[in-house]
Amino acid sequence: MGKKLLPGLIHRLPQNAMSRTMGKITATPFSRLAIQRYIKHYQIDTSIIEKPASEYRTLKEFFSRRLKPAARPIAPGPDTIVSPVDGTVSQLGDICEGTLIQAKGKDFSVSELLGGSEEEAKRYYGGKFITIYLSPRDYHRIHMPVTGDLSSYCYLPGRLYPVNQLGIENVDRLFARNERLVTHIKTDNLGEMALVKVGALFVGSVKVCYNTATTNIKHGRQTHEKIAGTPRYEKGSELGWFEFGSTVILLLESNQLEWAAGVEKGKSLLMGQALATKKAE
């Protein structure tokens, strides 16, 4: 009975309020008492984190921990795109007729993912996409997949359905309905890219390094703005972070790319590992 009721229940939950409350709880000094239990439950490798676990003041701070510089080598080469996050590949493939795959029998459009701009969406028709799920045990900092210029960003308010298998299988157009923060990137030789950071149930918020944009704002409104100064970020540079687990979708304009060996549905990725390369001419 529980399994039958749960899919219906996720539509009725006050998801955004619950997530804001969770964010507040995990930011209290009291929450640091849960850090060791969290490490043990999720079997987190503390040898590669930036500082000892005892030095984190809250569970939220530990969750969005940085790693030691050598923990995630960045695959070299101007024609190589790297994974922006640690996580598991949920879906990947070609963008056919402006459509992305969520799960078997469930699709959604590039246009609605990017906030309804058909002009922006058309740029990615014929390109590629990859969806990467970050579990609670993963490293939750988000990094640049290539060297490029940050041209604009878009905040899209919405629901906060869970992005685990339960949500993917039971919520139509899940990633186009959840809150999103999109960063648009212009590259030198690999076309344009859109790095879509998708919020989820109990994700306190999504943060970025290039300005004060964030998600899960009470009464938030859709925002699409140019990024001041069009800053240039190197491949592997930190771009932002999740305050609890979620999903990243990377849209690639170029149709001259091929997936790197081992990048396929269900496989785990580490930030910095080769994701795709430009086809040899």
Image (cartoon, rainbow, N blue to C red):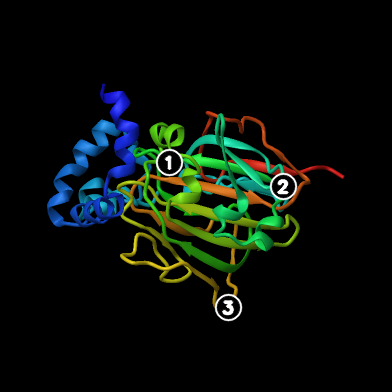
In which quadrant is the N terminus drawn? top left
Q: Nearer the viewer, mark 3 or mark 2?
A: 2
Label 1: element kind: loop
Earlier in the chain: of badge 3 and badge 1, it is: 1
Q: Assess whether mark 1 and mark 2 are in contact (beta carbons under 8 angstroms).
A: no
Give neighbour class at mark 3: few <14, some 14-19, many 20+ (Cα, 10 Å). few
Instruction: Write the residue at 30% across / 31% down.
Output: 6
**Residue at the image point whose x is 87% and y is 45% from the top:** 281
Q: Position of residue 76 (x, y in %)?
A: 65, 48
Q: Are marks 3 and 2 in contact (CB under 8 Å)?
A: no
Query: Element at badge 2?
Result: loop
Q: Residue at x 27, y 50 (%)?
A: 14
Residue 3 as seen in the image, left or right of residue 88: left
Mark 2: give few (<14), some (14-19) or many (20+) Cα within 10 Å: many
Q: Residues within 10 Å of mark 1 (few under 14, many from 20)?
A: many
Position of 20 relative to 13 (above/below): below
Which residue shows up at 33% across the image and 67% down it?
Answer: 219
Mark 3: amino acid? Gly
- Measure the alpha-carbon separation of dots 3 and 2: 28 Å
For disc 2, the marked residue is: 127
Tell me the mark number nearer the camera, choosing from 2 and 1: 2
Q: Which badge, 3 or 2, comes first in the chain's sequence?
A: 2
Q: Position of residue 248 (x, y in %)?
A: 50, 47
Query: Where does the image place residue 41, in percent across and percent down from the top left?
Result: 25, 31
Residue position for label 1: 134
Q: Amino acid at mark 2?
A: Gly
- Report if residue 46 is visible in the image: no
In what element is the residue under mark 3? loop
